[in-house]
Amino acid sequence: MQPTDPVQHQRDLQATLAQILALIEKQEVVSGLVERQETPRRELVQTLLARQQSVELRRALKLLHPADIAFVLENLPPARRSMVWNLLDERERGAALIELAGAVRESLLAELAEQEIVSIAATLDVAQIAELMPDLDPELAARVLNALDSDERRDVQSVLSFPKGSVGALMDVAIVKLRDDQDLGAALEQLRGRPALPANLDQVFIVDGRGVLAGALSLRDLLVNRPQAALQEVMRRDVVAFNTDDSLREAAGAFERYNLLSAPVVNLHGQPVGMLTVDKILDYREQQVQRERLNQVGLREDEDLFAPVWESARNRWLWLGVNLGTALVATRIIGLFEDSIVQIVALASLMPIVASIGGNTGNQTVALMIRGIAMRQITKENRRRFLAKEGAIGLVNGLMWGGIMAVVVFVLYGDAGLALVMMLAMAANLLVAACAGTWVPAALEDRGRDPVLGSSVMLTALTDSMGFFIFLGLATLILL
Amino acid sequence: MQPTDPVQHQRDLQATLAQILALIEKQEVVSGLVERQETPRRELVQTLLARQQSVELRRALKLLHPADIAFVLENLPPARRSMVWNLLDERERGAALIELAGAVRESLLAELAEQEIVSIAATLDVAQIAELMPDLDPELAARVLNALDSDERRDVQSVLSFPKGSVGALMDVAIVKLRDDQDLGAALEQLRGRPALPANLDQVFIVDGRGVLAGALSLRDLLVNRPQAALQEVMRRDVVAFNTDDSLREAAGAFERYNLLSAPVVNLHGQPVGMLTVDKILDYREQQVQRERLNQVGLREDEDLFAPVWESARNRWLWLGVNLGTALVATRIIGLFEDSIVQIVALASLMPIVASIGGNTGNQTVALMIRGIAMRQITKENRRRFLAKEGAIGLVNGLMWGGIMAVVVFVLYGDAGLALVMMLAMAANLLVAACAGTWVPAALEDRGRDPVLGSSVMLTALTDSMGFFIFLGLATLILL
């Protein structure tokens, strides 16, 4: 057997994508050629050729994991997406839908007939249906729900009842609960007798007579212990369990910190109602990382990379507006000193240095703050200590590098006063940057907002304006 | 039983930390008081009091997971770290060392006696020892290795032989291999007979007569199938397997894409030599995310938040130097147009708008590129399409928002020519930003470097310089 190497496989995917695109293009060219020949057998030839290409395309798709099919769909221009989509069977469509990025999924769902969505949903499991529901309009969602059997419907509704970002919304409801008054042999019998054990089962949960979580037993321990041993004897009692309303953000931290593979989720009564697995956490973290990357520069989570220009242009307006607003403030500050600039035009050339160095150093402080908050090393209590340290660093580096810049300025313009102004302004603006870099993320955090979001733009607005103000102000005071 | 809720527990950790700090302070105050009283019983009293506080501290520490002890150590000022450290036994020290952030770990290791490190290492498993080795100096590392038994030494050396960032370096070498010519009953017997099964075992690997990976069997399938079934009959044959030299970066992508919990790692001969588990991948991703966050702003991976000011100041020099360099280039470009600025001083006020809007929009394009590259949606083949789209967006938004700014400029300065220059310069610089935002990460990627690293600073250098040049150049051409 040749085991599949997923890394090699991922590299091959690019080739597969190219191959699929080539197949689609061939089919389009052939259809076009045939269409232009006005022969009586036109339709027949066209159908035959199209069928041959489809078989090849179908064969290529058949070899792919749903995640890979989703990858292919995301990377095709919208017109060609539907061609591949039409070659998939219902089960494959369902699996691919779940793996698709939000924007592409929405656009595909919008094109599908209601009945088709209902029958695709029938091929999915509870967690997958629950994931799909928010993208459907309410009427359609109700139809999908009604098509399920009553157990499934209840499970989907229960998962949907948990707010987005909570443990309950991401948990697996297919778990195995065993009463704590049996021995391992009986437990094994019970497991073997179940029609469908969850595929990713790695531990079973032990409950007492009231259904309250009493412990957990890994399959490993179930296997290696004597069948005569009582469950109560061999189960782990110090189980890490989440509540349904715990936040995923904090749950992810716990998974990472304690190296968990899966953990029971209990309701208010302490009864296990689901299980959170680390693969879900990995997906969640990955989404969060990518979302942060875009949010940081004012973009919505999932812009379809190949969406129409106009739609994408609008996605950037908020940010453009905010940036023009802060730039206008900086402009008005410079405007205050136009008289000074007319007298010493070198000020115009030098002022961007002070502003830009402040922005860049401030963003270092912001990055350290955000990381410290994320790793819970910076708390409300020790912020002051962090600020003191960052301020000291800003002052040390400001005086040192400001001194170096002062020499450069003196060489360029031969003006000792101007050189002194440069050094003082740089030191002062690095101090501003340290304060703003600590204060901005802290203020966002205190207001319960994500410190990653908007920290950088607020900081740069402050260091730019203050940089211009300090430099031009000092120059006006000292030199004029 | 009250199951531990890790989210609540994490919140409580802050309280625990405060409590531990209070205990340490109390002990210090008591010691101080006693020291100042020059009584003959001074030492005795001091010892007694210190012992009482130590017992309380010890009790608080005993309740903590090694990851939590590491958290406490990281959050204590260096002087107090050693106080907590001294209360831990060897096993706890070893476990905490593994969980500690790099910078804190290094500083603790530097303080320990050689013999102590050797005996701490003796409490760790192979993977943990391998993780610690790069932080030890070569002589000490050799002593640690010599203290191990020959099997362990061989395993540690084999893990260390794989380059950092490869699958081999992070795999677990404790795996279970079963020959493919037996039935489930015999396999179960064999498992039960082993002295120590890996704690996180979720699947066993099936090998043929030559030791080559033939398939895998989850413990779940081992449990539910009849004991009489042959392994060859029930094992999965389409196993996702990594090679020891696959990159962790790509392996993480595969874990996420295919929702893997664990996967075998094979050597060049296709023989399983280890197992990669998703909890390691989660830790790896988290480290990568935090490292990127810092690297993006030119900081080393792990600056100890409370390291001395001077050390931290030096950590920022490279970045300061780079930024001053690019700022100087922008300065010289403005310098070329000092004559124009003297004639129309409004240019000095308005030029930062053009530069800053270019930088901000360009960083949006950079973020989309980096995300697209990470999710492998932007390839060498479709870059041109992405560039065309970003360019079109830049032009649309440049003309539109440039038009708005033109109105603002006209209102402020009453100069139609200046307003026109503003609009044209904004549109042109947004076009530059789109090109640079696509080109810079692409160029880094092509050179095999991480596009996250330095993209932003290179982009801003380009959009700043070009922004000043375009705006001042157009103004000189049109208005003078």
Image (cartoon, coloured by chain):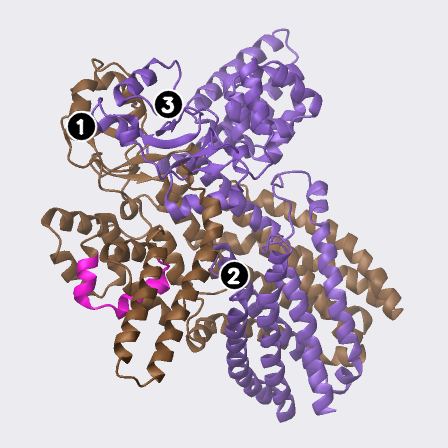
Chain colours: A purple, B brown
The image quadrant that residue A441 belongs to is: bottom right
Q: Can residue B206 be found in the magenta stretch?
A: no
Local SS, label 3: strand
The magenta span reads B100-120
The residue wearing badge 3 is A178
Q: Can residue B103 be found in the magenta stretch?
A: yes
The chain holding disc 2 is A
Picture coordinates of residue A336, whole percent (x, y): 79, 78
The residue wearing badge 1 is B192
> In 3D space, how far apart are the residues under numbered discs 1 and 2 (Cα atoms)?
48 Å
Q: Residue at x 86, y 68 (%)?
A: B412
In the image, residue A444 above or below residue A387: above
The chain holding disc 3 is A
- The quarter of the picture where the C terminus of chain A appears is bottom right
Picture coordinates of residue A257, whole percent (x, y): 40, 48
Task: For residue A190, say whether it is visible.
Answer: yes
View extreme (top): residue: A40
Q: Residues within 10 Å of mark 3 (few under 14, many from 20)?
A: many
Q: Are marks 3 and 1 on the same chain?
A: no
Local SS, label 1: helix
The image quadrant that residue A344 belongs to is: bottom right
Given the image, on which type of amino acid does mark 2 rest?
Thr
Task: For residue B203, say whether it is visible.
Answer: no
Asked whether the beta carbons under mark 1 and mark 2 sit within 8 Å of each other, the answer is: no
Given the image, on which type of amino acid does mark 3 rest?
Leu
Nearest the eye: B412 or A238: A238
Q: Is residue B183 left or right of residue A443?
A: left
